[in-house]
């Protein structure tokens, strides 16, 4: 389980000594395709029927100190939609859940979709369905979902202080940066492994960058699934 992308809630409501993870979810990160769709698999790990509910959170300020998650009301026609939002998961079964972006976005948008086993689901006919309270460890799985902009623009610039800033409308991942002296071949530059996503309006400053004359940036474009290299003069 990817701890960074999962939320763990431990419940001691049941006194039974058996403790187990009741389900798993894969993958933990989904990139919505150009048709506006993606999917995840919810896999049962118990011998009992479970009832699963989902919650959608909008993430702003991704990978910054200002990062914030805000719950989205069910059925919001302008956001991500989970289909189905609630469902029964039979013992040992796998359920495919669709993720659909209802409207095009102008800037890359990020959501977290939480999957949680609950004792019962609300029944519109006034009835409720329950499961035996055997789960003592309840894992709430948080899947990160990225929606690409309708017209992607990857724009990288170098700030006077040496920061690499994202002035486009989609994220890119900096893989490595090479710090070079004048006329120095790339293979002789000082290379730093970065492996960091830079979201729109965010920046990253390599260590000691102002002590060099040129920076070479190797980065990954998640939308066209390609690796690129770009260099900037520092002075």
Image (tube, grey):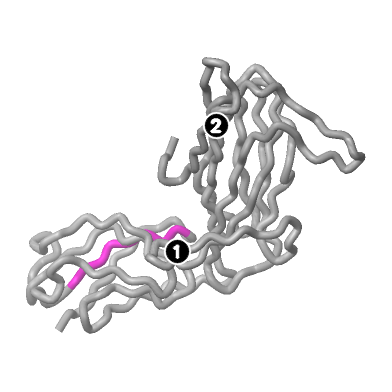
Neighbourhood count class around disc 2 (C-alpha, 10 Å): few under 14, some 14–19, many 20 upward: few
User: Does 217 sit left or right of 146 as displayed?
Assistant: left
Q: Magenta segment, principal secondary structure?
A: strand
Task: Name the image quarter holding residue 120.
Answer: top right
Please provide percent x and percent y for residue 16: 57, 16
Residue 182, compared with residue 78, is above or below; it is below
Residue drawn at (23%, 77%), measured in percent from left and top?
Answer: 232
Residue drawn at (62%, 39%), measured in percent from left and top?
Answer: 116
User: Which dot marks residue 11?
Assistant: 2
Please provide percent x and percent y for residue 200: 44, 71
First in residue order: circle 1 vs circle 2: 2
User: Does 9 sit left or right of 229 as displayed?
Assistant: right
The residue tagged 1 is 67
Of residue 156 and residue 2, the one placed in the foreground of this image is: 2
Q: Secondary structure at mark 1?
A: loop
Q: Which residues are magenta?
A: 215-222
């Amino acid at each position: 389980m990817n701890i960074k992308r999962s939320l763990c809630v431990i419940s001691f409501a049941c006194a039974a000594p058996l403790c187990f993870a009741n389900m798993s979810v894969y993958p933990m990160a989904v990139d919505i395709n150009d048709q506006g769709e993606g999917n995840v698999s919810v896999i049962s790990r118990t011998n009992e029927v479970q009832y699963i509910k989902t919650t959608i959170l909008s993430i702003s300020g991704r990978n910054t100190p200002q990062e914030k998650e805000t719950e989205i009301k069910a059925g919001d026609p302008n956001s991500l939609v989970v289909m189905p939002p609630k469902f029964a998961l039979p013992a040992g079964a796998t359920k495919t859940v669709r993720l659909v972006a209802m409207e095009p976005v102008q800037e890359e948008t990020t959501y977290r979709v939480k999957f949680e086993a609950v004792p019962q689901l609300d029944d519109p006919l006034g009835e409720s369905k329950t499961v035996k309270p055997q789960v003592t460890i309840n894992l709430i799985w948080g899947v990160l979902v990225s929606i690409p902009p309708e017209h992607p623009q990857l724009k990288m610039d170098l700030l006077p202080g040496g920061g690499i800033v994202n002035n486009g409308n989609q994220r890119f991942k900096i893989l490595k940066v090479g710090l070079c002296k004048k006329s120095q071949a790339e293979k002789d530059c000082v290379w730093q492994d970065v492996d960091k996503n830079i979201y729109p309006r965010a920046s990253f400053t390599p260590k000691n960058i102002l002590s060099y004359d040129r920076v070479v940036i190797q980065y990954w474009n998640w939308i066209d699934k390609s690796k690129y290299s770009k260099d900037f003069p520092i002075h």
